[in-house]
Amino acid sequence: MAVLPSPGYQLQPSAEQVPLSTNYITNFNFLNQYLPDTYEKEFERYGNRTVASFLRMVGAEMPSNSDMIKWAEQGRLHTKYVDCATSAAAAADSATITVSDAGVTAIAIRAGQTVYISDNATGISNKGIVTAVDVAANEFDVAYYEAGGQAFAITDTVSVWIYGSEFKKGTVGMIGSLEAQDEFFDNSPIIIKDKYAVSGSDMAQIGWVEITTENGATGYLWYLKSEHETRLRFEDYLETAMIEAVPAESGSGAANAGINPIYGNKGSEGIFYVVNDRGNVWGGGNPTTLVDFDAIISRLDKQGSIEENVIFVNRAFSFDIDDMLASQNSYGANGTSYGLFQNDKDMALNLGFTGFRRGYDFYKSDWKYLNDPTMRGGLPTGVGASGTVTGLLVPAGSTTVYDQILGKNAKRPFLHVRYRASETEDRRYKTWITGSAGGAQTSDLDAMEVNFLSERCVCTLGANNFVLFRYGA
């Protein structure tokens, strides 16, 4: 059995640009001697409809006075090359190794260093000492320690990493030095706007339904509801834009000023885009076994090894984690001994978990944005689905980066928002009223217009420590 598709959930209750007949009662017949018994207060059938909360939990907001946010992230302390070739045949006592890794312009290997060389396919390895280096050609000569010489064939692709050095007595020191190498990233803020308008006449008309919104606004003036809902919707967009934003690719319609002369032209790098691009991606939907999580933990070991992590999940992913942890209990298959122990018939049975430890600490938190059917909650899952996000692993704590605006190292949360601001203009969250109604006296327009604006971007520091869970390779 399954939940029937009809009757279903409504996706567009009343958010339209024009008054709808569904917003007002039209079936009153005052020639009828019997008046209806009405409920004055509207019923909140969808509960709290806002989806924003994620960035408030994991990030912070900081001002910026530039169109471009740039930061530097540390590179690796040790160097490993994985696309290397040897000039010698098997059993040779020495060889010339050529490094062909993408992006390598000057190898960080020096004469006198000892290296570990292994075959990428079989793991067969040699240890050797570097006797000469040609930095311009990305080549170095190596003499093997093993009497049997080179263990792999001349056609094999090998990996190389440095484990030390060795010098004879009375010799000169190491030739050459290494410079620290950072990786530089940037993002640019986007301008987000919204507006609500109501005529002076409608402001002077009271309704019979007492309205309420998530931020506690109540009253009998219908325009108050629409204005507050516009504000709540805008606040949600402040977060969802930071999650979903993508840069406008060269040659795209969004970047074409002829097609799109007014509404944006550059985009921004949102969290999902960044983690997809330079983070870690689990492409099989939801990991449901410890073996799956062991593969994720193995990847985290190769990244920043952050001790504490929070996994923000949709409902299905949350249940999968609960079931996985419950199955570790010897009674998990046929009993209910996990959750609240020493259960009896009058106690509530807790069938969920808030987290677990396996190598690292993982805490689980439901993410409403991934469940809401008007957002990502309505996307397809299962076999054939592609790109549907089911969760995001976020490292806890902060990291040290070099802030080029401040000109010094600074502690920053892994996720944080930068908004435009200066001594005279703060664009974190601007709102202003224009028109001639509702107390405004800025124009001869017989209406009140409430304007909203923000200019911001999200900075995803250390994206290599994040894991995005989604469907599709």
Image (cartoon, rainbow, N blue to C red):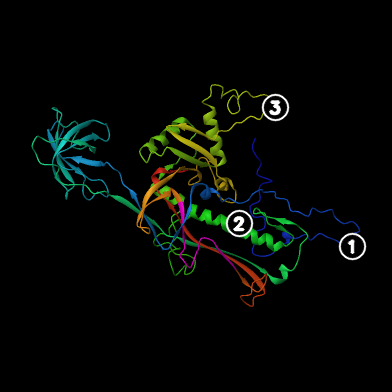
Residue type at tag 3:
Asp
Between the residue at mark 3 and the residue at mark 2, the CA separation in whole angstroms equals 41 Å
Left or right of 175? Residue 391 is right
Sequence-wise, the earlier of marks 3 and 2 is 2
Q: Residue furthest right?
A: 33
Name the element at disc 3. loop
Question: In which quadrant of the rendered image does the C terminus lie?
Answer: top left
Sequence-wise, the earlier of marks 1 and 3 is 1
Is residue 211 inside the magenta stretch? no
Q: Is residue 327 above or below residue 415?
A: above
Between the residue at mark 1 and the residue at mark 3, the CA separation in whole angstroms equals 55 Å
Q: In x, y percent, where is residue 460?
A: 42, 50
Q: Residue furthest left?
A: 170
Q: Nearer the viewer, mark 1 or mark 3?
A: 3
Q: Nearer the viewer, residue 291 or 213?
A: 213
Q: Nearer the viewer, residue 172 or 284?
A: 172
Question: In which quadrant of the rendered image does the N terminus lie?
Answer: top right
Task: Give residue 345's mark.
Answer: none
What span is colored magenta in the figure?
Answer: 416-432
Q: Callout 3 environment at 10 Å: few (<14), some (14 to 19), or many (20+)?
A: few
Residue at the spot of label 2: 232
Left or right of 440? Residue 263 is left
Q: Callout 1 environment at 10 Å: few (<14), some (14 to 19), or many (20+)?
A: few
> Mark 1 and 3 residues: CB-CB less than 8 Å, in contact?
no
Residue type at tag 2:
Leu
Residue type at tag 1:
Leu
Residue at the spot of label 1: 31
Residue at the spot of label 3: 346
Sequence-wise, the earlier of marks 2 and 1 is 1
Q: In x, y percent, where is residue 401?
A: 37, 50
Q: In x, y percent, where is residue 122?
A: 27, 31
